[in-house]
Each structure stands twice: as C-alpha cells, then as structure tokens.
C-alpha cells in the first residue's frame, strides 16, 4: 500500500469516528440539560451517550448478536465502512454469525475493512451501499 | 441499539411533548395546532428528521426548553420526512442527511420539487461537508453541525441566526 492511500484510510477513519461521536454529543448535551430538572433520567441519558462514545473510541459497537469482543469489533468495522449504518441485521447458523449492513459506502475503507475481516478470521463481501461480514461464533 | 433507555426516558420524561414519529410506509399524522409561546409570539413550528430515536428524543428535550419553538412532528427516514412535512407544513425542518430508505439530500430535493417553501436546516455530523454542500445546492437553507450547543441550534431554528 502506498503512502497516499494509507493517509486516505486514516483520514476517512478519523472522519468516521468524529461523525459517530458528533451524534452522541447531541445526546450528551440533552442529558446534561435534562439532569438540571430530572437528575436520574438526565444522568441516564448522558451516561448512555458517554458509553457509546467510549465504545466508538474502543473500536467496538453493540448488537444483540455481537456477543464477543470480536463480534463487536466486526460490527464497528461495518459502521465505519458504511457511514451511517442502517438496517444492521445479523443471523446465526452452522456456527457462523453474519452481520449485514447497509449505508453510504466509504470507498477508501474497503481495503482496510477486508484486512480487518482477515484479522477477525471473517469473510467480508462489499456491494454497492451494503456489506456482509461473516465470522465464527 | 437505543431501545433500552429510550423508551424509559421517553415514557418518564414529564413535560416532553409527544409528537408522532413517521417512518416509511406509515401515513403522516396531524400533530395539532400551534400554541402561542410564552412571550406572546407564535412559536416556530418544527419537524425533526433523524433515523436515531435517541437523537430525536434529545432534540425534543432541547426544544421544550425554548418557547420560540414548537415541535410538531418527527420522521425517521427521507420518505417519511417528505410525507410529514407536506402534511404538517412546518416553518422549519431540522434534517439529518444520512438516513435509510431515502437520505436527507433526496428528501430536500423532493420537498423543493413539490414546491414546499419552508426552511430546511441540515443537522449533520463531522465529515459530511461534501454532502452539506450538496444539500445547500438541493435547497437547504443552513447547516448546523451536530454537537453544537443547544442554544446555538435553537437560535438557528428560531431564525435569529443564519
């Protein structure tokens, strides 16, 4: 890989992380303001946004079927690859969990996502605005 | 992924207006008429469009603190946004760009094509600069980055800030 694509990948990843965090800043602000009137619920909301930001920075994302750290990492890779990740589904069969996501494909991250899938012992298929990542349970 | 706390927070947050949220395939509903704000002026009627339920809840919490604004409807995707806005005819729409079914860019263009003349404020995250430029070209009026202080967002929605 040449230097320029590496920088493109790094820049795109950084933008993706900032994009994810920005969403949660809105929620954090709302939680802090709500806490002025309702401390418990405001704190709950703020804590939820902080957890999400922590997860983004820790390079993992939630999904009910993402039961292991590797699965959470796989979901995060899809989030990064597809921008705002919509319709994230998962299914399990024959010892394999397959996460399918749709969104706006970040083209500079395709090679990076394949490398990540290899590290996770997974298989990645990327289409137009969609991707599927399968890995062992 | 946000269902855990969102339902609880929504149900238990006294005073947060409950407005209809429309998704693709569902018809837009009448959310009621405008009320007169605390200062005696008619509040700016707002529709918020974002696929994140938690983010819509956050905007709801933000708006209820500002008498200049009245949240009259919500939508969770671009198709629902077009239906809701045309049905409710708000003064301003707070529009996310990255959404399922039809994104914010397409929704803005559709609204303008159909002749809707209200204001569109794009509410989007970092890294969407190219899409924001396209949104302005498609007919959006202004852009507020997500993560800005809520007072600033409300000022833009109320029309006192560009």
Image: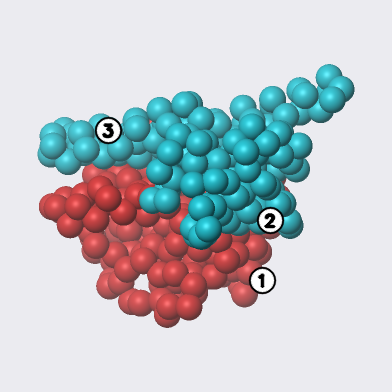
Chain colours: A cyan, B red
| Circle on res. A47 | 3
Q: Quadrant of residue B70?
A: bottom left
Q: Where residue A124 sits: x, y (%)?
A: 68, 47
Query: Mark number for residue A129?
Result: 2
Mark 3 element type: helix
The numbered mark at residue A88 is none
Q: Chain of mark 1?
A: B
- CA distance for labels 1 and 2: 26 Å
Chain of the residue under label 2: A
Residue assigned mark 1: B113
Q: Are marks 1 and 2 on the same chain?
A: no
Q: Residue at x 62, y 74 (%)?
A: B114
**Rendered location of residue B104, percent (x, y):** 58, 57
Q: Is the residue marked by circle 2 packed among few (<14), some (14-19), or many (20+) residues within 10 Å?
A: some
Q: CA distance from mark 2 to mark 3?
A: 32 Å
Whether residues under marks 1 and 2 lie with C-beta atoms below 8 angstroms apart, the answer is no
């Amino acid at each position: 890989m040449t230097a320029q694509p590496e920088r493109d990948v790094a820049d795109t990843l950084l933008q993706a992380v900032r994009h994810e965090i920005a969403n949660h800043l809105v929620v954090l602000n709302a939680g802090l303001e709500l806490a002025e009137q309702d401390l418990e619920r405001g704190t709950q909301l703020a804590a939820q946004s902080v957890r999400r930001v922590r997860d983004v920075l820790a390079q993992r994302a939630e999904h009910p079927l993402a039961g292991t750290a590797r699965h959470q990492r796989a979901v995060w890779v899809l989030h990064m690859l597809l921008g705002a990740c919509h319709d994230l589904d998962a299914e399990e069969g024959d010892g394999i969990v397959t996460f399918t996501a749709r969104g706006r494909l970040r083209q500079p991250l395709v090679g990076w996502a394949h490398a990540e899938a290899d590290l996770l012992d997974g298989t990645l298929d990327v289409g137009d605005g969609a991707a599927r990542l399968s890995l062992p349970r | 992924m946000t269902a855990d706390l969102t339902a609880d927070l929504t149900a238990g947050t006294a005073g947060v207006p409950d407005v209809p949220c429309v998704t693709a395939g569902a018809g837009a509903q009448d959310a009621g008429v405008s009320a007169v704000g605390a200062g005696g002026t008619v509040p700016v009627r707002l529709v918020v469009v974002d696929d994140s339920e938690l983010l819509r809840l956050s905007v709801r919490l933000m708006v209820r603190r500002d008498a200049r604004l009245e949240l009259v409807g919500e939508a969770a995707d671009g198709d629902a946004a077009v239906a809701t806005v045309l049905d409710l005819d708000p003064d301003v729409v707070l529009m996310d760009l990255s959404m399922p079914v039809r994104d914010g860019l397409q929704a803005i263009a559709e609204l303008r094509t159909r002749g809707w003349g209200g204001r569109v404020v794009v509410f989007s995250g970092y890294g969407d600069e190219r899409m924001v430029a396209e949104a302005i070209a498609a007919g959006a009026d202004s852009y507020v980055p997500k993560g800005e202080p809520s007072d600033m967002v409300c000022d833009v929605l109320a029309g006192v800030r560009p």
